[in-house]
Image (cartoon, helix red, strand yellow):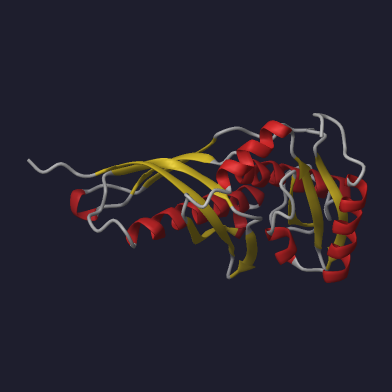
Amino acid sequence: MSRGRQSPEAPRVLLAVVLLCAAVGSRSLFAQNLRSDFLVAQLWCELDPLVQEPGQTYPLPQEAAVKQILSEAQFVFGGMLYGFDFVYTPADPARGVAERFELTPVAEIPWGDPRLRVLQTRTDGSRLIASLLYSLAPFQERWKQSWDSNLFPTATGRGSGSYYGGFPQKLASYRDAIKEAIRGYLRARVYNRPREVTGEVALQGSPSTIIESGEYFTTVTVKLKLDRIEPYRVY
């Protein structure tokens, strides 16, 4: 398939995805990458959130809700396709070292990218739920194939963010979940607390987020490329 052209079967494939999503109504479908040339996810936005931004109309108009979902999709699809660089310093109270975690996108999905599309939306109570698809260019397929390699281990983590902080804290719960996935993987395999760990991490499927007890709780599954595990030096 040449770059920028759609194969004859593509419309049928997309229609099948949409119909299957409507029939099954399952988030788990969107945790799978059904083909190598596109990614799928299902994300939601609250139409009547507890935290209201100055000047914003409430309940949120659908256009504003879709815009927020697309912003979230940039993070999710970028994390699934390109991944993130990370630097992690575990907390070490005995040494007076505070935990530090930096997560930097390797590359980003640009705003307005025509490859990112909303397949369908539906409301569930006060939420707008959107099914999204990101079509991959040939060079992006190679990125995805590299992360699909069985050489890289997987890990799962659950992170949180304050519900009262609004949408930025929902994204913070994603980052916290990624950190916890890395932390859990290391704790089971590195017995001496490291001074610093660097590497890359990629999302495997769409994160799952719930609201409970005033917190966003997000669960992610990731793949890891560990570059360096630096121990503390003993003199």
Q: Nearer the viewer, residue 127 or 235?
A: 235
Is the residue 52 above or below the residue 135 in the image?
Answer: below
Q: Is residue 50 left or right of residue 114?
A: left
Q: Quadrant of residue 116?
A: top right
Q: Is residue 54 left or right of residue 108?
A: right
Q: How many marks?
A: 0
Residue 36: percent from the left, percent from the top? 71, 46
The answer to whether one can see residue 114 in this image is: yes
The answer to whether one can see residue 61 in this image is: no
Q: Residue at x 84, y 63 (%)?
A: 21
Q: Is residue 15 left or right of residue 202?
A: right
Q: Quadrant of the N terminus?
A: top right
Q: Nearer the viewer, residue 51 or 108?
A: 108
Q: Quadrant of the C terminus?
A: top left
Q: Nearer the viewer, residue 225 or 114?
A: 225
Residue 100: percent from the left, percent from the top? 37, 45
Q: Is residue 3 left or right of residue 36?
A: right
Q: Residue at x 55, y 46 (%)?
A: 202
Residue 201: percent from the left, percent from the top? 50, 45
Q: Residue at x 87, y 32 (%)?
A: 5
Q: Residue at x 72, y 33 (%)?
A: 138
Residue 137: percent from the left, percent from the top? 74, 34
Which residue sits furthest left?
A: 235
Which residue sits furthest top?
A: 3
